[in-house]
């Protein structure tokens, strides 16, 4: 016990509650099994309680909840909850997803219909170009609600942390807060998208446009939330998967122009003709977004990701 206390003295001395120590131990790989076999405690939380009681504190030990500048009127703003940490690959994937949401439909239409679409002699291209403006406006307006929802969830989780009796209770109280934050963000995104889309009645398949924008917004929101809590790997993987799935149809259409490869055009042409080009974007974003939501519900309900940063 003395060795463990020396090894994690800073964590134990700066914690204001045993649950924060339990979260830190969990992040360092000490699970309930190790607590029982190596330290003769029933779980990590009971081990954290003993460490919290045994540790010797000095005036230089600052509580984990006190971020630099706190106590002087400084509070972290809501935008800090969505700070970036994507890396080059994640940033490029995010830019591609955003750009494709704006010009992906016209691009596919032009590749499918050739010079006729580029010359404006077919209907789908002008409608698709007109549909890009509402999407751009809705995504831009949703940035502020996304930051507020992320900040609300972070604050909520930090308040639940000292009030929970163990890690399981913290998870039970945090998961509904995450789902509420996601629901509020999607509601705000659709609230911005609805009047913008209504102003463009010629846009084909409006329901698909709503669903595609919601799927993209959900994917980017969850990716930013996970990255802000120090979990960028899953966020980058999901955005890269969606970007690759969106890049596949136009690349396939370009490859179909090579001699002897005309058959490659058929799957994309059939899907775009039957359901519209927006359906391809929807199919690319929905699976990664749902997978990231399932991962976020599990990962963000762990106390270890809500410690001081």
Image: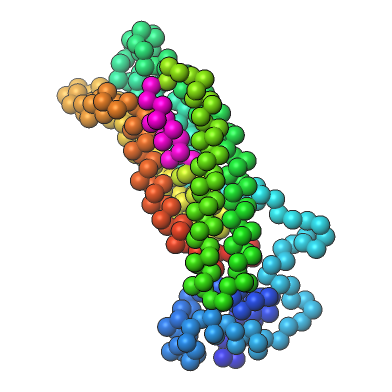
Q: Which residues are magenta?
A: 204-217
How far across and down, in percent of the image, does residue 302 sit?
A: 50, 67
- Residue 289, compared with residue 24, is above or below; it is above
What is the quadrant of residue 65 in the picture?
bottom right
Q: Residue at x 73, y 83 (%)?
A: 57
What is the quadrant of residue 252 in the picture?
top left
Looking at the image, residue 124 sits to the left or right of residue 225; the answer is left
- Residue 274, compared with residue 87, is above or below; it is above
User: Can residue 268 be seen in the rendering of this structure?
Assistant: no
Q: Main secondary structure of the magenta part?
A: helix
Looking at the image, residue 147 sits to the left or right of residue 103; the answer is right
Is residue 212 found inside the magenta-colored segment of the image? Answer: yes
How far across and down, in percent of the image, does residue 150 sit?
A: 59, 51
Q: Nearer the viewer, residue 234 or 180?
A: 180
Is residue 139 found inside the magenta-colored segment of the image? Answer: no
- Residue 246, compared with residue 5, is above or below; it is above
């Amino acid at each position: 016990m003395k060795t463990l206390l020396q090894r994690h003295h800073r964590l134990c001395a700066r914690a204001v509650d045993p649950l924060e120590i339990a979260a830190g131990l969990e992040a360092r790989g000490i699970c309930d099994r190790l607590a029982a076999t190596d330290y003769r405690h029933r779980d990590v939380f009971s081990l954290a309680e003993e460490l919290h009681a045994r540790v010797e504190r000095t005036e230089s030990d600052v509580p984990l909840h006190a971020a630099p500048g706190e106590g002087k009127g400084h509070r972290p703003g809501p935008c800090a909850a969505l700070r970036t940490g994507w890396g080059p690959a994640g940033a490029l994937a995010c830019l591609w997803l955003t750009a494709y949401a704006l010009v992906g439909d016209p691009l596919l239409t032009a590749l499918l219909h050739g010079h006729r679409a580029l010359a404006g002699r077919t209907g789908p291209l002008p409608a698709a170009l007109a549909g890009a403006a509402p999407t751009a406006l809705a995504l831009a307006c949703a940035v502020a609600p996304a930051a507020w929802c992320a900040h609300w969830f972070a604050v909520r989780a930090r308040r639940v942390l000292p009030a929970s009796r163990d890690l399981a209770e913290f998870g039970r109280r945090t998961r509904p807060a995450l789902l509420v934050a996601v629901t509020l963000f999607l509601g705000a995104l659709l609230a911005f998208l609805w009047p913008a889309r209504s102003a463009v009645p010629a846009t084909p398949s409006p329901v698909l446009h709503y669903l595609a924008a919601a799927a993209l917004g959900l994917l980017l929101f969850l990716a930013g939330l996970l990255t802000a809590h120090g979990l960028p790997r899953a966020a980058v993987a999901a955005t890269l998967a969606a970007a690759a799935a969106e890049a596949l149809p136009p690349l396939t259409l370009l490859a179909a122009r090579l001699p002897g490869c005309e058959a490659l055009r058929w799957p994309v042409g059939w899907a775009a003709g039957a359901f519209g080009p927006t359906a391809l974007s929807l199919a690319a974003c929905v699976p990664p977004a749902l997978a990231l939501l399932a991962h976020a519900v599990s990962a963000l309900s762990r106390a270890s990701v809500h410690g001081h940063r």
